[in-house]
Image (spheres, rainbow, N blue to C red):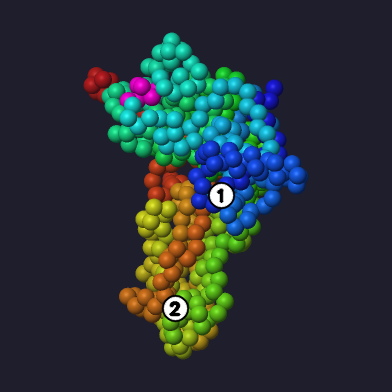
Amino acid sequence: MAVITVENVSKRFRKGQTGYHTLREDVYNLTGRLIRLRTGGVKGEDKQHILALRNVSFQIEQGEKVGIIGRNGSGKTTLLRLLAGITKPTAGKISVKGRIGVLIELMAGFHPELTGRENIYLNGAIMGMSKKEIRRKFDEIVAFAELEEFIDTPIKRYSSGMHIRLGFAVSAHLEPDILLVDEVLAVGDAAFQKKCLGKLEGVAQEGRTVVFVSHNMGSIANLCPRAILLVDGTKHGDGPSDMVISEYISTVAEHPGERIWGNPETAPGNERFRLRAVRVVCDGQVTPSVDIEKDVRIEIEFWNLKAGSQPHTSIHLVDKMGVVVLASANLPSANLINDEWFGKPHPVGLYRTACTLPGNFLNEGLYSITAMVLADIISIEILEREAISFTVYDTGAMRKEFGGFWAGVVRPRLSWQTEYRGPLNSGERESQ
């Protein structure tokens, strides 16, 4: 039995609008519907508006676990807001059967002045539960959220992690028929993320429906047998998760993972050096999306404009929070190989230099490359911050076995070995 039916749904926003349903939007939508009755559909973007979703259709059966994936801006969160009834479609129809639990964004559904206890009862009442039903689940919710000491504290004093724990615990434990979960879980720590994924598994095994939005392909692959791919507001794929994830990665790869400056007179640099290109290469292909188990090659091309120069290149690998994960340079002391151009004057011309980051080294996430060309160790001639970015995805064996996000900036596979050293001797047994 289908519990969610989406039929030819489109959603138009005025640029700069948050997406929440307002009286103005009511009037706008009503006018738009009258126009569409005459014109036969939803028009594309204009200077004032943008279509976040375009003619999206699908059904979800009771008890299904469905992942919604896509790049930033593809319409994933807009779709979840429509399913939750937070906002209404500009065109098309949505039918949802059953009680919905929603965890879409931080503080959604919470009153900041009320305590954690009061918010649990408030959310339960909004979902149509009686006080008796909420009371029956109360201790379980508090224990899962690990907030026993703070349950009578106003949640405006909670940290973001405490908000997430309480929000998920309430949404998952108040017995919704359908649970909608957005990427907001990424705020939690690794242990809590793993616990949440386990709870989502339990919710689905109880016959309830889960719709899960995430950029974490490993979590989607582990939790959801089915996935829906959104690309620029349209449904681009729908089927078994492994196939849709592969389609997503190939779709991301269509966006060239490089930046090129074609004119040596205007490219970053000076009269001595000019930057030509920075790119990310994996499996011989330029790409902004790499498998965590694959080597990543960072290439820098530059023009040497003065004969006799002895330049070298350097990179800073920066995470999404702006922290330098590592720095590397094409210097004899920092290179595992002997570059043929070490210590040699460079003729005028175009050069390409590259370094390789090994597979199973970086953790999953978004990274950027700051590229530099130096005349010597301290003279930076070209500095191009965030010249290019790329995303590392973990869909491999380590993600599947662990089931959660690996802590740390890097996620290497290291050599481990266990030895059997023999039975306990008598002295050791006595000390027990």
Q: Which residue is mark 2?
A: 269
Q: Which residue is mark 1?
A: 14
Q: Which residues are magenta?
A: 115-120
Residue 357: x, y in percent?
Answer: 48, 59
| Dot 1 crowding, Cα within 10 Å, few <14, some 14–19, many 20+ | some
On the image, the x and y values in percent for residue 52 come to 60, 47
Is 319 in front, or is 171? 171
Seen in the picture, residue 329 relative to 143 is either above or below; the reply is below
Number of numbered discs on residues: 2
Q: Is residue 345 visible?
A: no
Question: Can you say which quadrant of the picture contains the N terminus?
Answer: top right
State how far apart marks 2 and 1 are (Cα): 40 Å
Disc 2 crowd rating (10 Å Cα; few below 14, some 14-19, many 20+) is: many
Q: Amino acid at mark 2?
A: Gly
Of circles 2 and 1, the one toward us is 1
Residue at screen point 32% across, 30% down = 113
Where is residue 57, by image quadrant?
top right
Q: Are marks 2 and 1 in contact (CB under 8 Å)?
A: no
Q: Residue at x 49, y 59 (%)?
A: 389
Quick one: 426 or 366, which is closer to the camera? 366
Q: Is residue 175 left or right of residue 253?
A: left
| Residue 94, image x, y percentages | 65, 32
Q: Position of residue 63 (x, y in %)?
A: 62, 24
Q: Secondary structure at mark 1?
A: strand
- N-term-proximal mark, 2 vs 1: 1
